[in-house]
Image (spheres, rainbow, N blue to C red):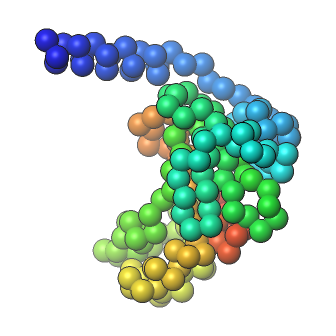
Amino acid sequence: MKKILLLTALTALLSACASLPETKGTASSKSPQATLPFGAVEESCAAKGRELGQLIEKNGRWKLYDTRPGTVGPRNFFVTGFSDGCPRKVTGAVALFGDLALYELVNYGGGGGALRTETDKAYAGIRGCGAGVCSDGKLKRLSRSTAFVSVYPTPGSRQSFELLMHKRKLVAAAVR
């Protein structure tokens, strides 16, 4: 009986996700509530306090906020920790900090290192580790000043919008 209820709930959730309308916005809208097209990022200096939403994750000085945690549809996320004091806003269904060690392994382990996106190219210039995977010590030092945020348009999507931040600045952004 429990399995039937679980499968019924899962089916209902998947149906709800499939029927969600695509949310659109304009990158020129400086309203903290306005959504952006997927793959856009905006300085949102007007967003403060509750407008940022709920803090969902920290990575060093960087903080990631969700305006509607627990929902499955596209919504705004804010990243704070920039030197100018202005949060950066992105829109998606899921957002999270990436792991530098995993990024290193995927991109530089086993002969990797193909620079496919602007974030890959920018990270290659920041990392300073040569052709192979960075040492644990170097990664630890690098993680104090560098972070990735990955934003997904829908739960389970393979496509992502990636932000690379370094020394309290947004240095690159790209859709993967």
Q: Residue 10: tell me if it is visible.
A: yes
Taking the image as shown, residue 33 lies to the left or right of residue 93, namely right
Q: Nearer the viewer, residue 46 or 21?
A: 46
Place of residue 47 in the rendered image (x, y in percent of width and height, measured from the top left): 79, 44
Residue 124, placed above or below residue 95: below
Image location of residue 156, percent across then percent down: 41, 37
Indicate whether 45 appears above or below 17: below
Of residues 37 and 148, which is closer to you in this image? 148
Apparent side of residue 23 relative to residue 148 in the rendered image (left or right): right
Instruction: State which quarter of the image contains the N terminus.
Output: top left
Kindly indicate the quadrant of the structure image that contains residue 117: bottom right
Q: Position of residue 94 (x, y in %)?
A: 51, 40
Residue occupying the point 73% across, 52% down: 88
Which residue lies at the image location 70% right of the left edge and 43% below the top edge? 52
Q: From what the image shows, is residue 81 above or below residue 40?
A: below
Q: Quarter-wise, where is residue 11 in the image?
A: top left
